[in-house]
Image (cartoon, helix red, strand yellow):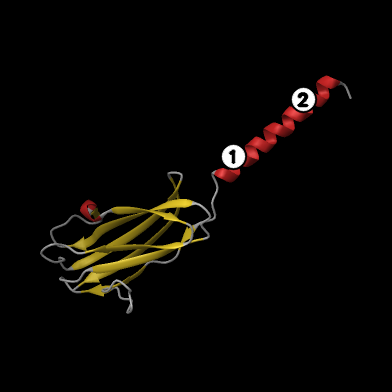
C-alpha cells in the first residue's frame, strides 16, 4: 500500500468517526410520559373534569433523558362558547428546561374562571430545538 492510499484511508476513517460523533450528539431517546391532570399540585386524584374556579395542575415525566431538553406546554380551547375552535390560549403557554429524568409540572387558572367547554393541553419535548416527543390530554370544564 502506498503512502497516498494509507493517508486517504486514515482521512476516510476520521470522517466516519466525526459523522458518528455528530449523529450521537444530536440524537436522544428521551420521551414524555402521558399527561396526568388534577386539581391539586400532587395530582393525588387524577381528573379530566374541572369546575370553573379550579386551578388545573398537570405533569409529564421526562424519561430516558441523558441530557437537557425543553418541555413546552400549550393550552387550547377546543370547544368553548365564544371562542373559535382549537384556539391556543397563548397567555397559558410556558416552557421549562429539564436535566436528566425529571417531571415537568404545569398549572394554570383563568382569572374570572374557566368558561365551560372542552380544552386540550399539549406538552412538547424539544432536544436542540427539535421536537422529539409530544403528549396531549383533553379536559372538560363544567
Between residue 112 and residue 139, name the one nearer to us.
112
Residue at image coords 55%, 47%: 27
Label 2: few (<14), some (14–19) or many (≥20) C-alpha neighbours in 10 Å: few
Question: Is disc 2 placed on a helix, strand or loop?
Answer: helix
Apparent side of residue 117 relative to residue 36 in the rendered image (left or right): left
Residue that carries the numbered disc 2 in the rendered image: 8
Q: CA distance from mark 1 to mark 2?
A: 21 Å
Query: Which mark, residue 101?
Result: none
Task: Give coordinates of residue 107: x percent, y percent.
Answer: 27, 64
Give the quarter of the figure containing the N terminus: top right
Task: Give coordinates of residue 13: x percent, y percent.
Answer: 73, 34
Between residue 79 and residue 45, name the one nearer to us.
45
Residue at image coords 33%, 52%: 95
Query: Which mark, residue 22?
Result: 1
Task: Give coordinates of residue 49: x percent, y percent.
Answer: 25, 74
For residue 80, above or below residue 38: above
For residue 9, above or below residue 21: above
Residue 14: image quadrant is top right
Apparent side of residue 23 relative to residue 40 in the rendered image (left or right): right
First in residue order: circle 1 vs circle 2: 2
- Residue reaching furthest front? 99
Give the quarter of the figure containing the C terminus: bottom left
Question: Is disc 1 placed on a helix, strand or loop?
Answer: helix
Task: Give coordinates of residue 124: x percent, y percent.
Answer: 39, 54
Residue 74: image quadrant is bottom left
- Residue reaching furthest right? 1
Residue at image coords 27%, 58%: 75
Amino acid at each position: 500500500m502506498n503512502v497516498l492510499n494509507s493517508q486517504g484511508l486514515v482521512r476516510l476513517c476520521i470522517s466516519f468517526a466525526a459523522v458518528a460523533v455528530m449523529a450521537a450528539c444530536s440524537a436522544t431517546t428521551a420521551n414524555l410520559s402521558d399527561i396526568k391532570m388534577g386539581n391539586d399540585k400532587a395530582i393525588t386524584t387524577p381528573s379530566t373534569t374541572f369546575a370553573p374556579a379550579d386551578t388545573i395542575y398537570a405533569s409529564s415525566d421526562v424519561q430516558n433523558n441523558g441530557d437537557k431538553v425543553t418541555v413546552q406546554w400549550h393550552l387550547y380551547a377546543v370547544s368553548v362558547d365564544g371562542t373559535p375552535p382549537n384556539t391556543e390560549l397563548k397567555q397559558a403557554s410556558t416552557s421549562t428546561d429539564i436535566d436528566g429524568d425529571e417531571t415537568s409540572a404545569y398549572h394554570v387558572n383563568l382569572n374570572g374562571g374557566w368558561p365551560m367547554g372542552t380544552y386540550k393541553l399539549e406538552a412538547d419535548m424539544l432536544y436542540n430545538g427539535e421536537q422529539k416527543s409530544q403528549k396531549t390530554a383533553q379536559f372538560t370544564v363544567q
